[in-house]
């Protein structure tokens, strides 16, 4: 990532301290290698040591800044994670509630369209189809459009037709009996 303003300033401070301390450290090493221990010690104590200390202070300041920045980024990442987790949980709970609500609404609309439970409507339809018109079909108040309401209307219509056929059959039977009696009377008069 590109450095922030503070990070850039820290890097510049480290580079400046290094540019000051590195040649002095090299000078101390050269004097030491040349067996000039007294001069090396004097340069180390008076110039190289304080310059190196400033360099280390600049490095430590940058490390402290980076650690603080890392801690802040970590805390922000944890907060983002918790927010995303809570959002996901809330979304799942809402989705489940909507699924349950939609399932209930669909079931209710199907039951309303049928007028009763599907198994009950199927059983009543089979019994009417088998010719059992004696069963009682109970409707909800104001139910005129459900499948069960139409099944009841069909049952009532079939009952009316069967009743009409019975009455007509009885009328035909009575008329046949009367015709038979009439034929019998005619036959008796003819014999007389």
Image (cartoon, rainbow, N blue to C red):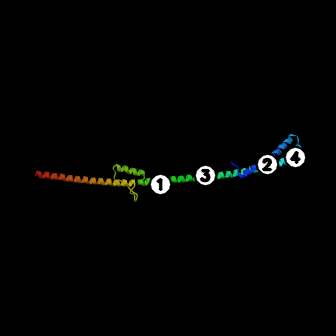
Q: Quadrant of residue 137?
A: bottom left
Q: Taking the image as drawn, is residue 171 in sight?
A: yes
Label 1 residue SS: helix
Category of crowding for the residue at label 3, using alpha-carbon neighbours closer than 10 angstroms: few (below 14), some (14–19), many (at least 20): few
Q: Which mark is residue 105?
A: 1
Q: Disc 2 or disc 4, which is closer to the eye?
A: 2
Q: Which mark is residue 84?
A: 3
Q: Earlier in the sequence, mark 4 or mark 3?
A: 4
- Residue at 42% over, 54% down: 113
- Residue at 84% over, 43% down: 27
- Residue 58 lies, in percent from the top left, at 77, 50
Q: Quadrant of residue 163?
A: bottom left
Category of crowding for the residue at label 2, using alpha-carbon neighbours closer than 10 angstroms: few (below 14), some (14–19), many (at least 20): many
- Residue 167 lies, in percent from the top left, at 26, 54
* 109 horizontally vs 12: left or right: left
- Residue at 28% over, 54% down: 164
Q: Earlier in the sequence, mark 2 or mark 4?
A: 2
Estimate the spatial distance between the alpha carbons at disc 4 and disc 3, rounded to whole Å: 61 Å
Q: Disc 4 or disc 3, which is closer to the eye?
A: 4
Q: Which mark is residue 42?
A: 4
Q: Earlier in the sequence, mark 3 or mark 2?
A: 2
Question: Farthest residue in the bottom direction?
Answer: 141
Q: Earlier in the sequence, mark 3 or mark 1?
A: 3
Label 4 residue SS: helix
Estimate the spatial distance between the alpha carbons at disc 4 and disc 1, rounded to whole Å: 92 Å
Nearer-the-camera pick, 80 or 129 = 80
- Residue 3 lies, in percent from the top left, at 70, 49
Estimate the spatial distance between the alpha carbons at disc 3 and disc 1, rounded to whole Å: 31 Å
Q: Which residue is mark 2?
A: 17
Estimate the spatial distance between the alpha carbons at disc 1 and disc 2, rounded to whole Å: 75 Å
Q: Disc 3 or disc 2, which is closer to the eye?
A: 2
């Amino acid at each position: 990532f590109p450095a922030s303003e503070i990070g850039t300033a820290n890097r510049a401070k480290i580079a400046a301290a290094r540019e000051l301390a590195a040649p002095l450290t090299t000078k101390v090493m050269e004097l030491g290698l040349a067996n000039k221990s007294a001069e090396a010690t004097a340069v180390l104590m008076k110039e190289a040591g304080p310059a190196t200390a400033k360099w280390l202070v600049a490095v430590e300041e940058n490390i402290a800044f980076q650690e603080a920045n890392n801690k802040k980024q970590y805390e922000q990442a944890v907060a983002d994670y918790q927010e995303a987790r809570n959002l996901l949980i809330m979304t799942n709970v809402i989705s489940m509630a909507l699924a349950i609500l939609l399932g209930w609404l669909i079931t209710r609309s199907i039951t309303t369209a049928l007028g009763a439970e599907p198994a009950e409507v199927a059983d009543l339809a089979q019994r009417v189809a088998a010719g059992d018109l004696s069963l009682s079909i109970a409707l909800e108040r104001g139910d005129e459009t459900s499948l069960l309401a139409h099944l009841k209307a069909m049952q009532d219509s079939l009952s009316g037709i069967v009743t009409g056929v019975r009455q007509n059959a009885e009328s035909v039977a009575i008329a046949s009996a009367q015709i038979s009696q009439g034929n019998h009377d005619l036959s008796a008069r003819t014999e007389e």
